[in-house]
Image (cartoon, rainbow, N blue to C red):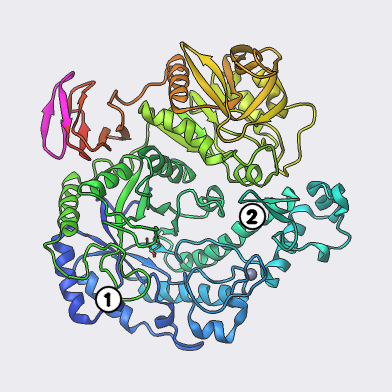
Amino acid sequence: MGYGKNVHEILYGGDYNPEQWPDEVWREDMRLLKKAHINEVTLNVFSWAALQPDEDTYDFSKLDKIMELVREHGLKVCMATSTGAHPAWMARKYPDILRTEADGRKRKFGGRHNSCPNSPTYRKYAQRLAEKLAERYQDYENIVAWHVSNEYGGACYCENCEKAFRRWLKRKYKTLDEVNRSFNTSFWGHTFYDWEDIVLPSGLSEHIVFDGVEKTMFQGISLDYMRFMSDSILDCFCLEYDAIKKITPEIPITTNLMRLYKELDYFKWAKQMDFISWDNYPQPTSSAAETSFAHDLMRGIGGQNSFVLMEQTPSVTNWHPFNRLKRPGVMRLLSYQAAAHGADAIQFFQIRRSIGACEKYHGAVIDHAGREDTRVFREVTQLGEELSKLGDVFLEGRTPAQTAIVFDWDNWWALEYSAGPSVRMNYLDAVLDYYTACHALNIPVDVIGTEDELSPYKVVIAPLLYMVKSGYDAKIRRFTESGGTFVTTYFSGIVDEHDLVHPGGYPGMIKDILGIWVEEQDALAEGESNAFVYGEAEYPADVLCDIMHLEGAECISSYQRDFYQKTPVITRNFYGKGQAWYVGTRSDKAFYRALIGDIAEEAGVFGIMETPDDVEAAARTTEKGTVVFLLNHKETDETVILNTQYQELLTEKNYSRGSKITLPAKGVAVLVKPEG
Ligand code: GLA
Ligand code: ZN
């Protein structure tokens, strides 16, 4: 829902830190923001030290002035609570607020995102600050949302966290016997006799590093620690959420997420947030598909509602090893890509570049020069003009997806914590293999969690579904039985939610749906590969080769080499009214594109439009109709033949069916079907 029912335009703005500047700069900023068509500012992200200079004093005088100023200038406010970094006095007086690293070192004051989530001090004062802010600013009708803390993340290994972990386990398992069973502690004689025997899993206890990848000797406890830490940090969000909700029940509350952030189970987080917002900082080398996937995941955790692009840089970051400028047009292109995948607001980090500390070389709308005649300011202004022209045309629009990709944090953690069969197995790579194929075919995708329904989709792809939680097999069974096409891959169906193997042969609970039995898995070294033929072409088999038997499925393709030559690698099983595919190895881009193309066609799923490679077509459907975005990610001009009659909203040009539209390098078109 983005900012929700009180906002009827695309909000455009971002993080603004006037507290770092004297008043006369504020006035100039207001003039510049108006000029750039900016209508929103995110305030108060890191001001805890100023707002609470000591234990008993709260001082809102500066923030009051800023709030008056921005209201006077007609700006909407996304109001942060400042709890992403604690004040120095608090760390001096209450060291429990400081985090402890996995190696046992206790941190000193410094940095940010630095508070122990189980610190009683942090919880008390963060909640209190949120409450005081809500009380003080509740009557500002221009506040469109609360932004709790900032980019929650990390982990803590202090004694408070250890005690809290034991309490968390007690709530989950009730008895120590059940803990021992779930962790399979009879292995290596790790039986716990007393709750106090349980310590946090880390390099000091169960963790080891294999070839640069952190592994654990007991997946059960490590998996639960990930869940516990994600929950602990989420509790901190909820404490502030509840404090604010009591006072301003109508104002939606969010916190800014970070795409594929492994440490936090965002599906769980999303349930506690009124809307999703996130920060998009693609690497200069990221593919268009990777960024689209991140948007689709962020939309997906929120139940496919629209979201807010809380931050992106207008030009450059400061934290990559070398910080390449976004080329002319790229900021605009990435903004429309976000909009095409569900963003209802486009915001920057940051409005004005600070003069000191580690972000002084991070891009901003207003640079150190303080001038409006810069490339970046001009690009920001142009986009601002365009967005205000578009009005509410795509707001709250849905992605018309008939294909879903399953994504699951528990599965991600468990798969990559397991020792064997290969450190080369990577969950994100596997997911992106399939997503990238859909993206290349302009097939809209919803990214769904394991609690989401499968019935809205014709095709469901669950790459590397290593963990099949209890009941999930039944969901897949129902979906396939009633006509759906289910696709999964090598090393799937192996374990339950405790990372205990489903005995009776792989892929465990979903064996019958797939009609196969996987007997062994062969891990291949970097540079080694097997091969198979699909359609007319030969493709590589890489990373892992599942060696399997048919138990009802048909063999679509077999291995070309090695002792398992001629045994199946790709299978299809007709199940009920549907079918279930198993792709027993990792292959290359061309293969995934061919396979997904065939599966989609057979299932009656179509792309938005045919486009040249690296020209993306994505759509959002509102009550009024469908908006199609064409995004040229290439360095060259590209031409698309339109599949129906359209009006392009930015140029107001009309196009007939079958006519050509030329997109300049990095160019964008926003198309709607003309009325009548
Ligand atoms: C994050 C933070 C911001 C800022 C930017 C810099 O997204 O939320 O405060 O540090 O990174 O890229
Ligand atoms: Zn801690």
Kindly indicate whether the residue at mark 1 contacts the one at mark 2 (C-beta within 8 angstroms): no
The quadrant in which residue 531 appears is top right
Expressed as whole percent of the image width and height from the top left, the position of residue 284 reads 34, 48
As shown in the figure, which amino acid type bears the numbered disc 1?
Ile
Please say whether residue 284 is one of the residues in the magenta stretch.
Answer: no
| Magenta run includes residue 656 | yes
Specify the quarter for ligand 2: bottom right
Question: Which-is-in-front pick, marks 2 and 1?
Answer: 2
Residue behind label 1 places its C-beta within 8 angstroms of ligand 1: no
Front in this rendered view, residue 329 or 476: 329
Q: Residues within 10 Å of mark 1 (few under 14, many from 20)?
A: some
Q: Which residues are magenta?
A: 647-662
Q: Which residue is mark 2?
A: 226
Q: Which residue is depicted at the point 66% across and 47% down?
A: 417
Instruction: Point out residue 139 in the picture as x, y percentages from the top left corner.
Output: 33, 71
Count of marks placed on residues: 2
Mark 1 lies on residue:
66
Corner quadrant of residue 22 = bottom left
* Residue in the foreground of this view, choosing between 38 and 337: 337
Task: Please indicate whether residue 381 sits to the left or right of residue 169 in the image.
Answer: left
Q: Secondary structure at mark 2?
A: helix
261 relative to 290 in the view: left or right: right
Residue 456 is tagged as none
**Residue under the image location 71 percent in, 67 percent down:** 162
Closest to the observer, 59 or 309: 309
Q: Position of residue 23 (x, y in %)?
A: 21, 81
- Looking at the picture, tell me which residue is in the foreground, 236 or 274: 236
* Placement of 629 over or under 79, stated as above or below: above
Mark-to-mark CA distance, 2 and 1: 40 Å
Circle 2: residue type? Met
